[in-house]
Amino acid sequence: MCDSPKKKFIEDFNINNGNGYKGREVYIIKNHPQVHVEIKKIDSENWFEKLYKYINSIKEAPICKLCGGNVMFYNVRKGYATYCSMDCRNKDNDLKLIGDKNPMKNKNVVDKSKKTKLIKYGDEHYNNKEQQYKTKEKKYDDKYYNNRLKARKTSLYKYGTENYTNRELAKKTSFNKYDDEYYNNRKKHVKTNNEKYGIEYYNNRELAKKTSFNKYGVVHHTQSKKYKEARFVKTINQWANKLNINVDDIKYNGDTYIINNYCNSHDSFNINKYVLRNRLNYGISNICTICNPVSENSSIKEGEIRNFIENELNLNTQKIKINNKEIDIFIPGKKKLGIEFNGLYWHSHLNLDSNYHLNKLDIMNENSIYLLNIFENEWIHKKEIVKSIIKSKLDIFNNKIYGRKTHVIEITNNKLVREFLETNHIQGFVGSKVKLGLFHENELVGLMTFGKKRIAMGSKTSLDGEYEMLRFCNKLNTQIVGGASKLFKYFIKNYQPKSIITYADRRYSMGELYKTLGFDHIGNTEPNYWYFKSHEYILHYRFKFRKDVLVREGFDASKTEHQIMDERGYMRIYDCGNMKFEFKLG
């Protein structure tokens, strides 16, 4: 079955399904027959267990975290238990208590605590009963300061009774205030209801039905056309007030609103009611779906990546969640490759914080999952490069060349370098001083470039003999065994550098190549950001929008770079930062 029916079912299942009726077999047979066929194939006697496995793409039920035994299935929302029994759960908690979560189980911590108390309070058991008695007697002249006798004494002094909250006092207070010893009793409620509503139990079901029928003509008022129309009018008025437009400028068609006279650039646009609500809740400055396309486009592109993996590479994919972080596309197996598709608008600073992508990457790396972060514009404009990167991470290559069958040539034709990088490198062209090409049978199949250390990457100066490796890539879908090493050795031999630095973009690299070449990992940079306009799908590096540049162009010097760019209609999207490497000679 294709992904579309499953995707539609999950979206339907997660909307207005408070009582879970959309998980019942009858509902699924009627509304999602293809999904029902797939669920029936899943091995389980419990229908809801089948449904849970289907939604979460689980083939085998999990086992006890501690002993490996069978665990209980709860329900579709909660899933499976973590342990097979309370015995296993308690044992596992006992194991945890030995560590940092209960430091007082650690002898060193206990000894240090006793030593501190002895120095500070003169007693290594400062919190013991005798010490408490001593302190209270010194402070209050009563070693049982909080005891019952003290409480009675205070209550007698303050309220005239030893037991302030006792029943007799409560009766007296109630009588003085309400002329009734049992003011809150059932008889009082019944009397009030009779006087006010003519019925002993005002909130009973029959009265509610009667009131609803008199007002709306149906027993359950939420089913009435009159009630629904009233709700609709109220909702339209709310949207109009928030959008600062007239009620007549909003039309409703199914689940979609047609908004008129709101956007300065477009007279009219359609927007789903849930998207409208979310955009207003998130405080989006312009809700226009033409200026800011809806994430459905991103879902389509994400589906294209999934189809490429499943249909062209013949690999299975699934969605997984770790520490409440979901991976869009996960390829199980030895490589454990995860792919996160990042729609520009929904992953911009308007919706996510600057560390979102980095935090997710770190969590996946901690769980031995290699996570690729693909930006929407890369799939649109550099689809073949993205496909080649995915294949290389899975050790899938169309061509394999051995480095010994290649030769290195220094390239002076800048046009050739530009064309090769734009075709084969995800970051495209960058100017360089040294351009080393790897040729096989007179064809350029690999390229490595060097130059001075870049200011844009944080380098202030570049002394003689100090270089930055700017780019390295092979021809798409091609593995060159020993090719990078051959180019790098050529550079060292012929240019004799003192040091070389380079950066690995953490969105699609863990720096394995540089470690192989002998570089040392010297740190990571903070997440970087790019500017974009949602309808253009083009990223602009922040360096060209520095505040000094903007001020020279005539923008307000009293405003920050972000404020100026926000006013110009640009949004920001953050990456995962870079790994920084250094190679030193001598």
Image: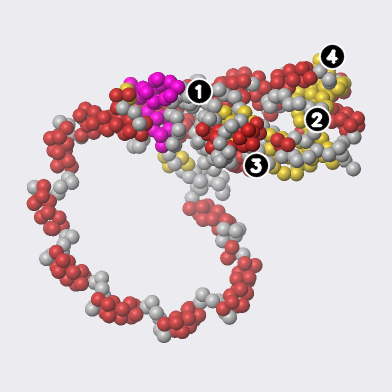
Can residue 87 be seen by looking at this rendering? yes
Mark 3, Cα crowd under 10 Å, few <14 / some 14-19 / many 20+, is some
Q: Distance from label 2 to label 3 (Cα)? A: 23 Å
Q: Is residue 303 visible?
A: no
Q: Where is residue 414 drawn, in percent x and y?
A: 79, 19
Colouring method of the image: secondary structure
Mark 2–mark 1 contact, CB under 8 Å? Answer: no
Q: Is mark 2 on a helix, strand or loop?
A: strand
Q: Distance between the residues labelled 1 and 4?
A: 42 Å
Residue 403 is drawn in which quadrant? top right
* Residue located beneath label 4 in the image: 442
Residue 523 vertical position relative to residue 488 in the rendered view, above or below: below
Tell me which residue sits at (57%, 56%) in the image.
96
* Residue 152 shown in magenta: no
Residue drawn at the location 25% of the way across and 76% of the way down: 159
Q: Earlier in the sequence, mark 2 or mark 3?
A: 2
Which residues are the magenta region? Answer: 253-281
Going from N to C along the chain, the mark reached first, 1 or 4, is 1
Mark 1 and 3 residues: CB-CB less than 8 Å, in contact?
no
**Where is residue 1 shown, x and y percent of the image?**
50, 20
For residue 416, the mark is none
| Three-letter amino acid code at the position of disc 1 | Asn
The picture places residue 301, in percent across and down from the top left corner, at 54, 23
Local crowd at mark 4 within 10 Å, few (<14), some, or many (≥20)? few
Inspect the image, locate mark 2, and give the three-letter code of the amino acid beneath it: Phe
Looking at the picture, does residue 376 appear above or below residue 441?
A: below
Depth check, front residue: 269 or 159 = 269
Residue 321 sits above or below residue 374 on the image? below
The residue that label 2 is drawn on is 450
**Alpha-carbon span between mark 1 and mark 3:** 29 Å
User: On the image, numbered disc 3 is attached to which residue?
Assistant: 526
